[in-house]
Image: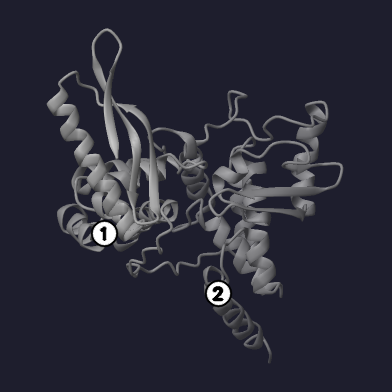
Amino acid sequence: MLSIRTRGKNGIYYIRGVVTLGDKQIEVKEYSSGTNDRDAASHLMAEHETKLRHQLMFGPAAIVAQGKIADAFTSYLSKARPPCPSDVLRIGKLNGIIGDLSLREPKQAWEQFRRAYLTGHDPAGQDRYRAVFQAAINVHNDLHDLPPLRIKAIPFSNERVRFLSKQDRDRLIASYTPHIQPIITMLAFHGPRIQTALQMPWGVEGIDMIECSIRLNHTKNAVIQSVPMHPRVMDVLRPIWENRGRPLKGHVFLNRFGQPYQDTRKAKIPGGNPIKNQHATACERAGIEDFTVHDWRHHWASHCVMAGIDLITIMNMGGWKSLRMVQRYASVSIEHMRSAINKLS
C-alpha cells in the first residue's frame, strides 16, 4: 500500500510505498504531492494507486489508455535523435489541435486533425503531417512495449522526373556565378540534396581530395555512402582546395561573403533554398525553363540510368531509402532507347 508523510518546515506531504496485485507489484519511490493539505494529498495518493493497480491488471496498454496524445508528442521530442525543425513545427500544430485527446483512439484523433486543419492542403503536405504523427505515437508505443500504429498513407504524385541534355547541362552550369558553379557541378554529377552539398566538409567525412572520394551524409534517410569523385567535380574542387592550403576540415562551399551557408535544416523556422535566386537567374540566362534546384537530383539519377547503372547502385549512391523511390527513373531508359533507335536509317 501507499502511505503519506510530511517533510520539511512547510509540511508538504510525500507519497511512497508498494502497490501489489497477486504476485505482481510496483514500487513507488517517494515523490512530493505538492500540497500540505492532508485530504488533498490522500486524494492524489488514492488516484495514483488506482492507476497503478489498473496497470498491474491490464498491462502496459493501461498506461497509454490513461494518457493523452500530447504524451506521445513529448516522447517523440525527447528521443535521443531529435526531429528536424520542420517536424517540430508540425508537432506544435498537431498538439495545439488534438494534444488533449485520448491515446486510446489515435486514428480518430488523426482524422479529427485532418478535418480541422488539413482541408485544402495538398496531399504531399498532408502525408508529412501523417508521417510525423504516426512516428510520435510509435515512439511512445515502443516505450511501453505496445505494437506500432499504422495509418494509411495519403497518396500523392511524386513522379516528377526532369533532366537536361548534356549540352543544356553544361550551358546552365556556365550561367551560374563563379562561386556557385562548383556546387552545381556536384549536384549534376553526384546528385546530393542541396543542403547535403552546401554543408559538405573537407576530409574523410566529406570531400577527401587525397582519396578522390566523397562521403555523402544523406541525413534525411540516415544513409552515409562514400563514392568515387567524378572527374568533373575533382576538376572544380581541386583549385579551391589548393588555394585554401589543402585543408582537412571546414566547409567546402562558402557564400559570396566567404562564410558557410546556413544549414536551414537546423533552423527554428526552416528557411528556403539559399541559392534559389542564383538558380533562377542562371536558368533565365541559359534559357532553361521548368527546372528547379532539386531537379539536378532528378537529372543525375536519370543520366545514371541512361548510362546503364543499375537501380540498386543508384539507390545506394543517391541515399534513397528504398528501391521504390528510384523506380520512377526506370522509364527514362526506355525513352532513351526509343530516341536512340529512331536515329537508325
Residue 66 spot, x, y in % from top left: 24, 50
Residue 118 spot, x, y in % from top left: 22, 55
**98 left or right of 311 in image:** left
Q: Amino acid type of disc 1?
A: Pro
Comparing 78 with 263, the one in front is 78
How many numbered callouts?
A: 2
Residue 191 spot, x, y in % from top left: 62, 56
Q: Is residue 35 above or below residue 84?
A: above
Q: Secondary structure at mark 2?
A: helix
Q: Secondary structure at mark 1?
A: helix
Q: Is residue 1 above or below residue 16?
A: below
**57 left or right of 199 in image:** left
Residue 286 spot, x, y in % from top left: 54, 51
| Callout 2–callout 1 Cβ contact below 8 Å | no
Image-quadrant location for residue 228: bottom right
N-terminal label among 2 and 1: 1
The residue at the point 41 percent across, 53 percent down is 144
Q: Quadrant of the C terminus?
A: bottom right
Reading the image, the residue beneath label 1 is 106
Reading the image, the residue beneath label 2 is 327
Pick out the residue farthest to the top.
Answer: 9
Comparing 151 with 160, the one in front is 151
Q: Amino acid type of disc 2?
A: Gln
Q: Quadrant of the N terminus?
A: top left
| Residue 79, disc | none
The residue at the point 56 percent across, 68 percent down is 322
**259 left or right of 88 in image:** right
Q: Residues within 10 Å of mark 1 (few under 14, many from 20)?
A: some
Image-quadrant location for residue 302: bottom right
Comparing 316 with 37, the one in front is 37
Q: Residues within 10 Å of mark 2 (few under 14, many from 20)?
A: some
